[in-house]
Image (cartoon, helix red, strand yellow):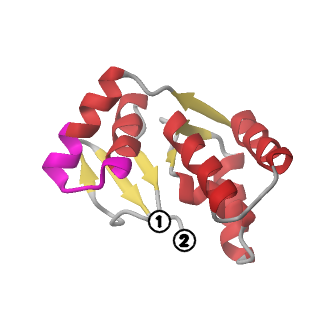
Amino acid sequence: MSKAFIDSNIVLYLLSADIAKADRSEEILADGGVISVQVLNEVVSVCRRKLKMPWEEIEALLLAVKAFCDIQPLTVASHEKAVEIAKRFQLSFYDANIVASALLSGAEVLFSEDMHSGMLIDGIRVQNPF
């Protein structure tokens, strides 16, 4: 069975005051999974811009996430797949990047709270884990 692909919103719930969602996010990450460089970039952006976290805390979070997850690189192929997916499924380009990386990783499920749960995109199922 392939590992699940984990969207940035799931990673960010590790920092949530919502204990149930934070615990569920921790379970998902502890099971291992796949993230992309795009996910890492989005996590850093939210942590700095919205949460105003210091770099030391962000780096600690990133190290923990990287310890549990395989990382899918951003490539020209993932970019081209993202453009195709954004056009075909009317997704934002950032969401399409996540989906493209998930597809290229071979994942069968994409855990995300931001996209329509149950949506099937080229064989990968979007699932809201909450």
> For mark 1, what is the residue?
113
Please state the horizontal and vertical placement of residue 86, each as a whole percent of the image: 22, 47
Q: Magenta residues?
A: 84-95
- Which kind of residue does numbered mark 2 sit on? Phe
Q: Is residue 128 left or right of residue 86?
A: right
Label 2: state its secondary structure. loop
Name the residue at 49% across, 26% down: 73
Q: Is residue 78 left or right of residue 68?
A: left
- Which kind of residue does numbered mark 1 sit on? Glu
Give whichever of 29, 62 is nearer the camera.
Answer: 62
- Magenta-drawn stretch contains 36: no
The kind of secondary structure the magenta stretch mainly shows is helix
Name the residue at 59% across, 41% down: 40
Q: Earlier in the sequence, mark 1 or mark 2?
A: 1
* Number of marks in the rendered image: 2
Looking at the rendering, in which quadrant would you find the C terminus? bottom right
> For mark 2, what is the residue?
130
In three-dimensional space, the C-alpha distance between marks 1 and 2, rounded to whole angstroms, equals 8 Å
Give whichever of 120, 78 is nearer the camera.
Answer: 78
Mark 1, Cα crowd under 10 Å, few <14 / some 14-19 / many 20+, is some
Q: What number is the disc on residue 49?
A: none
Cβ–Cβ under 8 Å for marks 1 and 2: yes
In this rendering, the answer to whether 43 lies above or below 65 is below
Name the residue at 34% across, 52% down: 125
Mark 2, Cα crowd under 10 Å, few <14 / some 14-19 / many 20+, is few
Please state the horizontal and vertical placement of residue 107, each as a whole percent of the image: 42, 38
Please state the horizontal and vertical placement of residue 52, each as a whole percent of the image: 74, 62
Label 1: state its secondary structure. loop
Q: Is residue 128 left or right of residue 20?
A: left
Name the residue at 66% across, 71% down: 21
Pick out the residue farthest to the right: 56
